[in-house]
Image: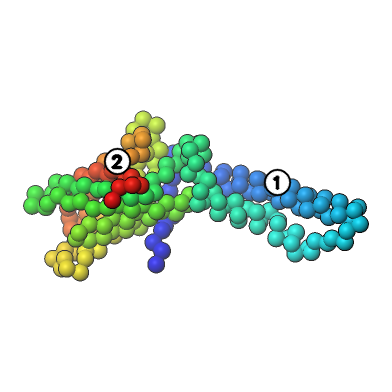
Amino acid sequence: MALEHEYAVLGGYNRTHVGRWLYRVAALLSALIVFAILSAVDLAHALGLNVNVPPTVLSLLGAGAVYGVLYWLFDHYAWKLSPLSRILKLPDLSGDWFCQGSPIEPSTAKPWSGKVTIIQSWDRLQIHLATEQSTSDSIAAALQYDAAAGYHLMYHYRNEPRVAEQHLAAHHGFAEVTFDSDLQSAAGDYFNGRGRNTFGTMSWTRRQADAP
């Protein structure tokens, strides 16, 4: 089951404007493609060749179809490119992160560690944390651009203990982390409730591609 959800972007480029720009580009590309095809057909006729393009082919090259292709490329790849990412004020956080947690309350809680996996596209996101005792997945999230402090990631998550951890209760929580300017590390806080009632700090370090 796909767990990716939409997320808000605060302080970044307006997503509605992005959609408008994509449609303008799609309309222009569609017109150029259709013009090129019709020009090629006219040239073929001038050379005595019997070439015809069915109307259905031209309809498939309409602005709506081109927009769908452009949006898919933008959603999965283009927004991550460095120039665009800076303009959009939206960082690429996808990948694996090592996580170290330090509980503050209750005092009997022990430090913990785990792996955070972020799946991110232009309009969807999933934050998954796996530890020895439980797993958690984000339910809602927001990314905020702060020119002074960097990027903030705020998300609400649902935690499920592993089968062997029957003394732990499933619960909901909230976390907020701030990323360093190089997007290789982050630090923040977490707050658990509805069955756990603990809170603390945590630090993330991006897992390099060649790390085990």
Q: Say what secondary structure mark 1 lies in.
A: helix
Please state the horizontal and vertical placement of residue 132, each as a whole percent of the image: 20, 59
Please state the horizontal and vertical placement of residue 15, each as a whole percent of the image: 52, 46
Residue at (48, 38) in percent of width and height? 82
Q: Is residue 9 left or right of residue 131?
A: right
Quadrant in the picture for residue 182: top left
Q: Is residue 42 above or below residue 185?
A: below
Residue at (51, 48) in percent of width and height? 77
Q: Mark 2 points at which residue?
A: 186
Q: Is residue 70 left or right of residue 55?
A: left
User: What is the number of the mark on residue 6?
Assistant: none
The reply to whether residue 78 is in sight is: yes
All told, the count of numbered labels is 2
Q: Nearer the viewer, residue 16 or 37?
A: 37
Residue at (63, 53) in percent of width and height? 67
Q: Nearer the viewer, residue 148 or 182?
A: 182
User: What is the number of the mark on residue 28?
Assistant: 1
